[in-house]
Image (spheres, rainbow, N blue to C red):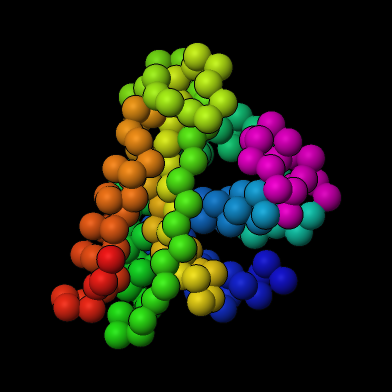
Amino acid sequence: MIRKIIAEYHLDEMIGRLIGKDAGLFLDLAAYSIVTENNAGQYYPDYAYNHPLFTQGMKLYSDSKVSSFINSITRDQCIAFQNEWNSRHDHREKIYISYDSTNKNCQAGDLECVEIGHPKDDNGKPILNYSIAYDHNNSEPLYYEEYPGSIVDVSQLQQMLLKAKGVWIPAGRFHS
């Protein structure tokens, strides 16, 4: 089923252009996240051993390779993917955006994007905020973004609406 979805949306082609030779690993990690509802890299090798893979020759990679691969993905590649993904949609069609934002406590140490904020469950750790917007009619994701931990939900929503207005909605068709 995952292979069919990837082919239907031409994700293999898009990821191949953006990621290059490790596109199969990228698709494997996406499938792993969906199938197991988990994103912990240290469990990927167990998953890979027992599931069909997209990597050339169904090559198994270690958790350290997964970690270095994920760290090699650049912000520019992420933005290029979002731009290409959204360019494939008919911008004349009306979309209904559903939006969700949340935050995650961070224990990873000193990262630029984490700050002390105001999470619902405040345990005193710095947090990362992120949001996702998707087309309510077909549940296709349209946009995701991370925000510093101190940014409040209302500010995140305002940023998302500006992005929606500029990316998906032709002038004159945006109503907030």
Quadrant (top left/top right/bottom left/bottom right) for the C terminus: bottom left
**Residue range of the region highlighted in magenta in the rendering:** 35-50
In the image, residue 25 lies at what x, y percent?
Answer: 58, 50
Specify whether residue 21 is painted magenta. Answer: no
Task: Give the residue displayed 51% in from the left and 56% down from the top.
Answer: 23
Q: Nearer the viewer, residue 43 or 145?
A: 145
Which residue is pictured at 73% across the width and 36% down the height?
43
User: In which image quadrant can residue 85 be found?
Assistant: bottom left
Residue in the image at 73% along x and 54% along y: 35
**Is 83 displayed left or right of 101 in the figure?**
left
Residue 49, image x, y percentages: 80, 46
Magenta span main SS? helix
Give the x, y percent position of residue 131. 43, 48
On screen, residue 169 above or below 93: above
Residue 62 pos. (x, y %)? 67, 35
- Front-most of 86 and 159? 159
**Picture quadrant where residue 99 is located:** bottom left
